[in-house]
Image: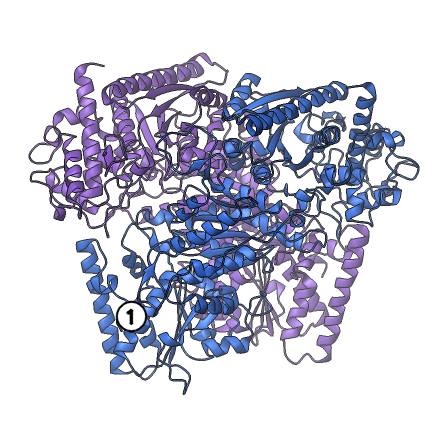
Chain colours: A blue, B purple
Amino acid sequence: MTPTELAELDAQWRAANYLTAGQIYLRGNPLLTEPLRPEHIKPRLLGHWGTSPGLTLVHTHLNRVIKARDLDAVCVWGPGHGGPAVLAHSWLDGSYSETYPDVSRDAAGMAELFRQFSFPGGVPSHVAPETPGSLHEGGELGYALTHAYGAAFDNPELVVACVIGDGEAETGPLAASWHANKFLDPVHDGAVLPVLHLNGYKIANPALLARIPEAELDALLRGYGHEPLYVTGDEPGPVHHAMAAAMDRALDRIAAIQRRARADGGADRPRWPMIVLRTPKGWTGPHDVDGVPVEGTWRAHQVPLPAVRENPAHLRQLESWLHSYRPRELFDEGGRPRPEVLARVPEGVRRLGASPHANGGLLLRDLPIPPLEAYAVDVEAPGRRTHEPTRVLGGLLEGVMAATAARRDFRVVGPDETASNRLQALYGATAKAWQAEMLPTDEHLARDGRVMEVLSEHLCQGWLEGYLLTGRHGLFASYEAFAHIVDSMVNQHIKWLRTARRLPWRRPVASLNYLLSSHVWRQDHNGFSHQDPGFVDHVLNKSPEVVRVYLPPDANTLLSVTDHVLRSRDYVNVIVAGKQPTFDWLTLEEARAHCARGVGVWEWAGTEDGSREPDAVLACAGDVPTQEALAAAWLLRRHLPDLAVRVVNVVDPARLLPRDAHPHGMPDAEYDAVFTRDRPVIFAYHGYPWLIHRLTYRRAGHEHLHVRGYQEEGTTTTPFDMVVRNDLDRFRLVMDVVDRVPGLGGRAVAVRQAMADARTRHHAWTRRHGTDLPEVADWTWGEG
Amino acid sequence: MTPTELAELDAQWRAANYLTAGQIYLRGNPLLTEPLRPEHIKPRLLGHWGTSPGLTLVHTHLNRVIKARDLDAVCVWGPGHGGPAVLAHSWLDGSYSETYPDVSRDAAGMAELFRQFSFPGGVPSHVAPETPGSLHEGGELGYALTHAYGAAFDNPELVVACVIGDGEAETGPLAASWHANKFLDPVHDGAVLPVLHLNGYKIANPALLARIPEAELDALLRGYGHEPLYVTGDEPGPVHHAMAAAMDRALDRIAAIQRRARADGGADRPRWPMIVLRTPKGWTGPHDVDGVPVEGTWRAHQVPLPAVRENPAHLRQLESWLHSYRPRELFDEGGRPRPEVLARVPEGVRRLGASPHANGGLLLRDLPIPPLEAYAVDVEAPGRRTHEPTRVLGGLLEGVMAATAARRDFRVVGPDETASNRLQALYGATAKAWQAEMLPTDEHLARDGRVMEVLSEHLCQGWLEGYLLTGRHGLFASYEAFAHIVDSMVNQHIKWLRTARRLPWRRPVASLNYLLSSHVWRQDHNGFSHQDPGFVDHVLNKSPEVVRVYLPPDANTLLSVTDHVLRSRDYVNVIVAGKQPTFDWLTLEEARAHCARGVGVWEWAGTEDGSREPDAVLACAGDVPTQEALAAAWLLRRHLPDLAVRVVNVVDPARLLPRDAHPHGMPDAEYDAVFTRDRPVIFAYHGYPWLIHRLTYRRAGHEHLHVRGYQEEGTTTTPFDMVVRNDLDRFRLVMDVVDRVPGLGGRAVAVRQAMADARTRHHAWTRRHGTDLPEVADWTWGEG
């Protein structure tokens, strides 16, 4: 590196550090054109200085190699608490002012950049959707590296740098993410360049990876399959030299790996390079404050000089700290960065702040979904035959995979459950991605597969998020109960989408689609630990503008719903659908109409004659509850043929919400027309029953609503025993109806007794034979 | 190892394998005394054979060393899907029959052992609370190793073996858990012996760690800080020899490490041994079925011969498989294990199935909690002064730490947030556990510390679960939003407790206590990503017999609640309490009475004269909502002095539930007496508002209830701006009251306008100054 290049890099780095500190501290006097006074200081000092100089160093050196090599690159900023560092660089490279014209690249804009940071009505303190060039919110730690891999898949020309803080490195999801290199195809995917930043401390504690011997760390990183390159120091000059050399070596190595795999067809799994950067926390900030060491310690984590408005000595120390960057050398009188500062900054879409990959909607193409007719099941009459809904869906997904074989912009992720969830038709069109050793007994593994299976819901979720935010499509298929493993990740993704939707410059991205199968009612093998339907509740707590939930009751409705969610944008869609044989209720045409409405009366199932309000409404949502509700309707037909029963099926529970609470909410008049205002409604619901109450409490008929659902009574048992244990079975539903319809008199008593007898028969049969009662197991609607 | 010893170990292993296969397949003919017929086979074949022979091998060899060395040991069975393997050993060693006398150690008992497995009304398919000797449910993978460390902390004489499946090893929590060895004190803690079992496959895919070169795996494990010992093979004899040697070497090494640290005061961080066991999946089961390889492939995962009832060839294959274990050599005519089988099985509490550490309530002692008076804050009048509640609590926790200094049965865990959550008084009595390198700038680190800080909520949760289930006490302090990271773990722990409570032989253990601080309303630094109050909703979905939630509004109520939860048993308690200055409302005596009731009218805050029902009820739950509700009451007093307002504070939201829905639920009469049946209730709630509706929808007054809470409107802003953005502020609450009290006429309009003006003033002031409106920031109740 020439002295000029070093000087230019250092100028850029100093400029970014100056702008970072300025954002944390200054509300006026941005260029220090006058002595610093208390009124120039923000009243509340918020932000994280400690990690920022490391981020600016990485950003500066990424800029260098991007420009020198004309790289297509993005960066995932794991230590996203250091928001001002990334904002500083975006302002420097001009992308900030292009995105937000009111923050111009001059003195006035610099003042606004400083003022707005962590200020009411301004911008948040972390790297966030508001940050140009970001595809990762750095607030909740753990997901940087899995996001980086998601961005790199099927982006063969892209380099995804990823800064990993030594705090984040302690988290489970990050620890698992290192092994994602066994899923990265050097031919069809881009490269991930991890930069592990060891600044030694977290909030208040040393960081583990910074406190093990370097030989142990080296073994660990090689054990992860990487070739580590070390950059260590606290003197800027030597660190710049070492960092430039490490970047060059890493990118040379990446280029060689890709060249070999792509041209020469090398089949060995490559050892990808990575960089270990060891620099002080709060580097170049106050060395000590009031006699206590700050730089290089945990005390530099947030605001290293906290009392600058009240303490003149601190104010002077801040001033001299800011002057240490020599702002006059960096910015001209108008506040514009001087040419030296920008000499090593790339231009146009090569700038990290302007990459279209970080605003993936710009690159998104509509998914080519084949017509559903080719996959739908024939239904000559409802409830006669069964199909496994997810197996039917597998056909459609195979069709999507086939249609994207050349485009490579669709992936299915899952924690080793794709076949268990019966989606294995997918393997007709693609394989499972795998770069590690393969054996002759293996099936459906290939380097270029687009089904991603790893026993980590965190990796699945992170990969898919990174893939979607860079403008592609996908589906996450999981066991229902274990979706909770990523509760906190989906929170963050929903927050991202909620914020991004309000930013006009962020283009819509494909929705994050969950298929939750192997659900609570059919965990015959695994029992209580695998029985939890609460992910829907979790998701429905979040922003209604983003979240959508679907409970298709059969194969054709599952096809229709999936077709819809795969075409949607900027949502988190949760589909709950079983894999076990389920009655076919609707033809494809009926399914489409029903799913479009979200809630519908199934006239063929009820016993209304249209002359009056029904005596009772049997409502249901979810495949197993629908089966039980329909069986209850069938029993009522036989036991009480003159009772007018209406059967309502709910695919989209958000329809139950008031219109002002969710975009899908039904007007009251429509709700009343379906559910009545005063008739008993027995609602068989897939999950926790109170969710239905929480959705409907403002409806007129709410006091007549009685919900059955999962009550945490689970174990390894038969399918029908599960619904009996939770009082969701057909016999209980019939009892619920007769208990609530007035005027049945002795007939109610008789029906109630017949139902209780059936439950007794069930109990005795199941305990004796270990199977379900034949009258239940063999029941079909069609018999009637 | 002598030929006799080998023969005895092999007999034990074969017996366990026979019993494992028997549980999966047989409902009759347990000793194969007659030819196997279809009616001897269970109608539904459930269970996981694949992992089981590995578990039985480890169990057999643990038995050997336990007996030979008189070890105090437990084992965490990570591949807990292999439930029948552990049940088999418990039946062999007699602990099963002691726990469940109806399953005797003879032919009749063996028949029952087989029949009940995965059978309706029987026992679940996984290692579960029902399994003697278990402290870990193996259904949801990821937590085995962190549980093992939790069990080992402060158990210096205990060896905790931990089997880690190669599937589980891919999860994030497990990947992070390897570094837990940097927190294990060789002086005060016991040893953890990880056994990484590479059988090569998960459900349907190869496992990562089984498919990287052994040199890379070795580097990885050494990078984790372990000394790996390898046992590889598919011939029983050599594997027995190798496993016995590895066990001996590992235990010798553990003994040497402990001796050196305890006697010689060695200060280096030890490299603990571990075992890598590489044997075929489904080992000793059917080699191939219908010409397709099964043993050693993923096809052995569950039931390797699925069609034995229908397919005579499969039935014969099963029979010959079962005979391959030579059951007549293993069991006498009465079905009792022969002496050779039991020769290497330990006795009494040394048996893994009988260890009191795996039924920790047997060892639990009451926690010595000092009197709260020493820590309570003086409150001469409500709402005059402020304290930081969690800082006050820190004093009490320091007292508990000091009182347990010798006993060492209390730990506080947290993800690098103990000081951030202002509990640092703890460091007056103990330090943070740390075995890695220490530097002079570090503070409060020590090898024997009992505050556990690592940036992994998963590790914190797992450590605490393991610690509690082995009979000790603790508290998990976390940022509120990030408790969702362990949603799925707490699910599993609640399920464990719910099941364990119903087992008479399981003694009550200390509750798992969460302190959620740095909550949604005070994330001034970190903004939207850190704002989520939904953990309470998540927990309240689970078994009411286990879950408890508390929202203490001030310092003294926090002390009282914490004192209560630390004394409780078999619950998951969630306390939400802020760390920022909060008004002191109640004296300690008042706080105790209020917390005991859970819901109370604060007469001093209202304007009722007792002559009539109030005009409106202002209810509140949570510290910030309480402040806003009290400020609203104060404003109403001034603007509408003749309005009769009742102020109700809720500490325990489960009190709002009907009595039949939760043990804490209030009778309707009591609820009505507090909230009225027909007056408007404006409820200021800490979290998502619909939770309050979901708790109260069955109450008479529900239609008059109006709840304000968090609506996902978050960012980096001032504290008061956060409540305004979510319509939880005092001015909005006043408007809500005047909008709902009839007959106020023009006064309502005037008050409404005054409140709207105040919100406008807030908006302008905050956007300009970046701080809260002085009339809000300086407000105290005491001024009135």
Quadrant occupied by the C terminus of chain A: bottom left
In this rendering, the answer to whether A430 lies above or below A641 is above
Image spot of residue A634 (x, y percent): 30, 73
Q: Residue furthest front?
A: A263
Figure quadrant of residue B145: top left
Is A464 situated left or right of A689 in this image? Answer: right
Reading the image, the residue beneath label 1 is: A782
Q: Residue furthest top?
A: B264
What's the residue at 28%, 25% (across, down)?
B62
**Which chain's residue wears label 1?**
A
Q: Secondary structure at mark 1?
A: helix
The number of numbered badges drawn on the structure is 1
Where residue B641 sits in the image (x, y, percent)? 69, 72
> Front-most of A156 and A675?
A156
Is there any visible trace of residue B693 in the rendered image? yes
Instruction: Give x and y (percent) for residue B693.
Output: 51, 65
Q: Is residue B154 above or below residue A765?
A: above
B723 relative to B145, above or below = below
Q: Residue A738, located in which quarter of the rendered image?
A: bottom left
Q: Does residue B564 appear anywhere in the picture?
A: no
Crowdedness near tag 1: few (<14), some (14–19) or many (≥20) residues, C-alpha within 10 Å: few
Left-right relation of B712 to B500 = right
Rendered residue at 66%/74% (across/down): B739
Residue placed most toward the observer, B165 or A435: A435
Residue positioned 71% across, 75% down in the render: B748
The image position of residue A18, as x and y in percent, is 81, 33
Q: Looking at numbered disc 1 in the image, what kind of residue is underneath it? A: Gly
Q: Is the N terminus of chain A in the top left, top right, bottom left or bottom right quadrant?
A: top right
